[in-house]
């Protein structure tokens, strides 16, 4: 008997290597004759580069080459996932703290580091744009050169784009209660425990680049563009990343290392420090003003939202983050009239990029806190007000788009029950509950090849990156189920553009749905071939797959190759270029105890509910959802990047930037799922893995409000901030519940 | 300078730079790359190894300081290629996500169990508080260590 793999807690694919230390991350790979790269930066955000003296470094022992903008092709190649705006090395000026102005290539890491110290960069510190106010101020310097977007009427501003979404007539919508507030969400950084690392080497007449990327095929395309090579001459090898969270989605220093490998004719390696990784990626910070109208019974009558999202010095994928999240800025609710205006602003800071939740934690911070505000004012229960407004399954909550695809109220009830909503609270305690919804993958394509070997075992080829979410396991489960073989007989090969077929990317919780279907499709192809073989050989119906293989292939042996794909085409007239293929819906609930003397928040209990359609591996879903919740506690309670007047990150590195540890865990934490098999993925599954952090902040903040009477609209909820707000509110009316 | 150190049972007599960290010696010198580097300032625990039975952040220790000592790394824990009870518990509990922090977690947990064979959940949380996991698998990691402690009974 084969154990049914779908729905089972199958052990993590690649798990054994991860507990023995055998797992090879980029920094563990050694190539013969490999050179080492050290980047050169200057210590401020925005500066004009006057001159760079590399002579001492060139002459230093072990140095093979020193490269600055002057040594790179002219015009300087620029790249990016959407806009080609990022230069390979800073040219003329630095635009954020840590932008490399040069690279030293040497025989050893130590020699490269020592030589980098010898480079003199004469520079003039310039005033910079480090905040939303500055970005909007017409007197501020321009971050981006206007000639990079000559036809854009906004080229002489720091606004990359202003997006408008909405429907209905907000100005004439009637409301009994209007709540009007401003919310802030800070800059936070991904802090994958694996700092970013890259290797490149010449290979035949092309180049091979090792990078822990989530998107090997996008990387291949962009490196090919920068180097002017055909795609087939660029091979991207992407060993499983040591955590990515969106930070390893788009190219950063890969074009540089590829170029250095071709220039030196040898393998080169660049390992960033954690500090340099902080300077490379972050979440988009924002300020959201939300004016929300409600009827006296708590139903929403309109949403009027205007926000500013602070991107960094280059667009990276930030505009897409802003568009996708703000498309659902009203949350999973039935909203008769909506107006959403959001500006994407450049600043002289680390380019913000994709980060788990892709803007949803930011927008849910506002829409959920707004519902709480209305609930406090009207005396309606905070869970009840959500249930009254949640879109029902099948209801098109964004007019004309994919309707609500889950029983979202079921998730809310489940979370409310688990947190003990409505039961008596101890003194100093409070509870909160919040929801969030994320538009999943829109357009996209995933291909898979499954090879059924002559002995009945199978190899799955998939371009997905397993960065911790366990795609290796789940794809093996799908193949095992479809082929009817034990999951232990399936190997999954990933992370090499020369070996696996095209996949758009590993993002948006799309892999189970898209690649899962591609793998299932490839298995169906195999089964059809086997049936054909069986009938040609005159075998009886119902013979085992191994018997068919043996009968067909005999002593010569062979294999059956299945090809599968899942595509979702671009829709030019859709605001996002395509309708979301599913929604990732999540509910978080928290019970906290606040120490009014210190402002410390103790999480007594925290629960998450994810509507996953069908949990293909419940243990993997739990580890993702709880892991996301822990990460969410970071931006809720402690994380924020602090900049000084010169745009320098003051809390650079693990000493000064705190992320949650075991000591920050809630005393109790549970993750639950809602499974109604109503997703588009295999067996009714939807994507999972981001949900657990999307509503953490509003749930915890709401609990803090109930415990203390103070409302806080800026994150994180540090003890200082909580204590200060409690002091300030003394003598004033707090919210009533 | 010349030092003598035993790593996972093998003796090494080596010349080392005075400023070489134990982490670099293990990773670059001995090619034992199971020990990971993240923060390099003693805050994340990814580089945890045992030196004479103590758990240390090898990024903060000089190789010279281990002279005459015995070092155990993650590679030394699966005796004869067989997973330890603790390693198996990590897999059974779903404690392993990306895996980058895991060698450090396993070594730190191994050390914890050596001192306190049957720890409570709170003791595990305390004992592993120096090991960051950004995948946030702390619940499962702590559960794995508690389970390994129970299994050792
Ligand atoms: S690398 Fe040693 S503690 Fe972080
Ligand atoms: S498993 Fe990814 S950092 Fe711990």
Image (tube, helix red, strand yellow):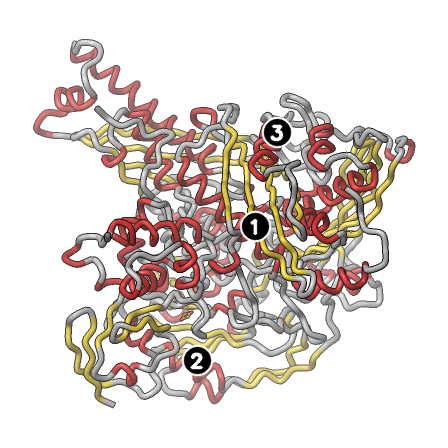
**Residue A29 percent across, percent down from the top left:** 31, 63
Task: Name the residue that disc number 2 marks.
Answer: A113
**Residue A527 percent across, percent down from the top left:** 29, 21
Q: Nearer the viewer, mark 2 or mark 3?
A: 3
State the residue in front, B21 or B29.
Answer: B21
Could you confirm whether marks 1 and 2 are on the same chain?
Answer: yes
Task: Name the residue that disc number 1 marks.
Answer: A604
The residue lying at 63 percent from left, 53 percent from top is A593
Would you identify the image quadrant in which residue A617 lies?
Answer: top left
Gap between marks 2 and 3, in whole Å? 54 Å
Badge 3 element: helix
Q: Are marks 1 and 3 in contact (CB under 8 Å)?
A: no
Task: Name the residue that disc number 3 marks.
Answer: A408
Q: Can you tell me whether the CB of the residue at mark 3 lies under 8 Å from the nearest atom of ligand 2?
A: no
The residue lying at 46 percent from left, 70 percent from top is B43
Please give the chain letter of the residue carrying mark 3: A
Q: Residues within 10 Å of mark 2 (few under 14, many from 20)?
A: some
Please give the chain letter of the residue carrying mark 2: A
**Residue A428 percent across, percent down from the top left:** 67, 53
**Residue A723 percent across, percent down from the top left:** 71, 63
The quarter of the rendered structure image containing the C terminus of chain A is top right
Q: Can you tell me whether the CB of the residue at mark 1 lies under 8 Å from the nearest atom of ligand 2?
A: no
Would you identify the image quadrant in which residue A692 lies?
Answer: top right
Please give the chain letter of the residue carrying mark 1: A
- Tag 2 or tag 1, which sits nearer the N-term? 2
Q: Nearer the viewer, mark 1 or mark 3?
A: 1
Would you identify the image quadrant in which residue A131 lies?
Answer: bottom right
Q: Residues within 10 Å of mark 3 (few under 14, many from 20)?
A: many
């Amino acid at each position: 008997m084969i154990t049914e793999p779908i729905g089972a807690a199958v052990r993590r694919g690649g798990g054994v290597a991860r507990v023995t230390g055998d797992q090879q991350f980029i920094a563990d790979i050694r190539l013969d004759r490999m050179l080492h790269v050290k980047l050169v930066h200057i210590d401020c955000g925005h500066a004009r580069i006057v001159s760079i003296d590399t002579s001492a470094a060139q002459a230093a022992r072990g140095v093979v080459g020193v490269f600055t903008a002057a040594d790179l092709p002219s015009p300087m190649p620029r790249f990016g996932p959407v806009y080609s705006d990022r230069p390979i090395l800073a040219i003329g000026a630095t635009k954020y703290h840590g932008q490399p102005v040069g690279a030293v290539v040497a025989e050893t890491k130590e020699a490269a580091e020592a030589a980098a110290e010898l480079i003199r960069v004469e520079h003039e510190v310039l005033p910079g744009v480090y905040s939303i106010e500055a970005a909007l101020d017409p007197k501020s310097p321009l971050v981006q050169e206007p000639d990079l977007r000559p036809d854009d009427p906004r080229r002489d501003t720091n606004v990359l784009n202003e997006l408008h979404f909405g429907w209905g007539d907000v100005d004439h919508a009637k409301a009994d209660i209007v709540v009007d507030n401003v919310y802030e969400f800070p800059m936070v950084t991904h802090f994958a425990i694996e700092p970013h690392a890259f290797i490149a080497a010449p290979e035949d007449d092309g180049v091979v680049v090792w990078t822990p990327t989530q998107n090997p095929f996008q990387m291949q395309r962009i490196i090919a563009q920068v180097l002017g090579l055909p795609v087939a001459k660029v091979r991207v090898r992407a060993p499983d990343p040591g955590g990515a969270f969106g930070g390893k989605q788009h190219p950063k220093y890969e074009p540089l290392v590829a170029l250095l490998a071709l220039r030196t004719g040898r393998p080169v390696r660049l390992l960033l420090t954690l500090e340099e990784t902080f300077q490379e990626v972050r979440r988009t910070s924002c300020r959201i003003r939300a004016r929300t109208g409600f009827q006296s019974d708590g139903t929403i009558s309109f949403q009027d939202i205007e926000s500013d999202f602070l991107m960094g010095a280059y667009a990276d994928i930030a505009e897409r983050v802003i568009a996708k999240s703000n498309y659902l800025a009203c949350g999973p609710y039935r909203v008769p009239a909506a107006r959403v205006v959001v500006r994407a602003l450049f600043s002289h800071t680390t380019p913000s990029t994709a980060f788990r939740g892709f803007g949803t934690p930011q927008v849910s911070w506002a829409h959920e806190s707004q519902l709480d505000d209305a609930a406090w004012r009207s005396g309606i229960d905070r869970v009840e007000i959500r249930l009254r407004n949640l879109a029902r399954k099948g209801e098109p909550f964004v007019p004309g788009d994919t309707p609500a695809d889950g029983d979202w109220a079921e998730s809310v009830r489940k979370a409310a029950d688990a947190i003990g909503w409505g039961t008596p609270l101890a003194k100093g305690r409070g509870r909160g509950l919040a929801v969030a919804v994320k538009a999943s993958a829109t357009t996209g394509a995933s291909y898979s090849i499954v090879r059924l070997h002559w002995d009945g075992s199978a190899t799955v080829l998939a371009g997905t990156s397993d960065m911790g979410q366990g795609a290796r396991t789940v794809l093996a489960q799908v193949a095992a189920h479809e082929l009817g073989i034990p999951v232990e007989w399936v190997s999954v090969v990933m992370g090499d553009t020369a070996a696996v077929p095209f996949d758009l990317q590993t993002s948006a919780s799309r892999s189970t749905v898209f690649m899962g279907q591609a793998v299932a499709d490839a298995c169906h192809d195999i089964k059809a071939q086997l049936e054909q073989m069986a009938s040609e050989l005159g075998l009886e119906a119902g013979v085992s797959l191994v018997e068919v293989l043996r009968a067909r292939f005999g002593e010569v042996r062979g294999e059956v190759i299945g090809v599968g794909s899942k595509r979702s085409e671009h829709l030019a007239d859709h605001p996002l270029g395509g309708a979301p293929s599913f929604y990732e819906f999540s509910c978080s609930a928290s019970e906290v105890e606040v120490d009014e003397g210190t402002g410390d928040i103790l999480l007594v209990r925290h629960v998450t509910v994810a509507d996953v359609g069908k949990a293909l591996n419940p243990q993997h879903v739990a580890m993702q959802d709880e892991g996301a919740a822990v990460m969410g506690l970071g931006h809720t309670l402690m994380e924020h990047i602090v900049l000084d007047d010169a745009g320098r990150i003051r809390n650079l590195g693990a000493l000064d930037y705190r992320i949650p540890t075991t000591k920050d865990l809630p005393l109790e934490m549970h993750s639950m799922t809602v499974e109604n098999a109503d997703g588009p993925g295999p067996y009714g599954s939807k994507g999972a893995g981001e949900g657990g952090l999307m509503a953490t902040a509003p749930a915890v903040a709401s609990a803090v409000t109930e415990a203390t009477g103070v409302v806080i609209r800026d994150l994180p909820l540090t003890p200082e901030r909580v204590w200060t707000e409690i002091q300030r509110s003394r003598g004033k009316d707090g919210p009533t519940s | 300078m010349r030092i003598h150190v035993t790593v996972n049972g093998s003796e090494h007599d080596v010349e080392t730079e005075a400023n070489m960290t134990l982490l670099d010696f293990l990773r670059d010198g001995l090619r034992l790359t199971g020990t990971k580097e993240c923060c390099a300032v003693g805050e994340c625990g990814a580089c945890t190894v045992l030196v004479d039975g103590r758990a240390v952040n090898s990024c903060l220790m000089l190789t010279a300081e281990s002279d005459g000592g015995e070092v155990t790394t993650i590679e030394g824990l699966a005796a004869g290629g067989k997973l330890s009870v603790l390693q198996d518990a990590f897999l059974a509990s779903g404690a392993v996500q990306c895996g980058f922090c895991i060698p450090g977690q396993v070594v730190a947990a191994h050390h914890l169990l050596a001192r306190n064979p049957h720890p409570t959940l709170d003791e595990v949380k305390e004992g592993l508080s120096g090991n960051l996991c950004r995948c946030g698998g702390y619940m499962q990691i702590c559960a794995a260590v508690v389970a390994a402690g129970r299994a050792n009974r």
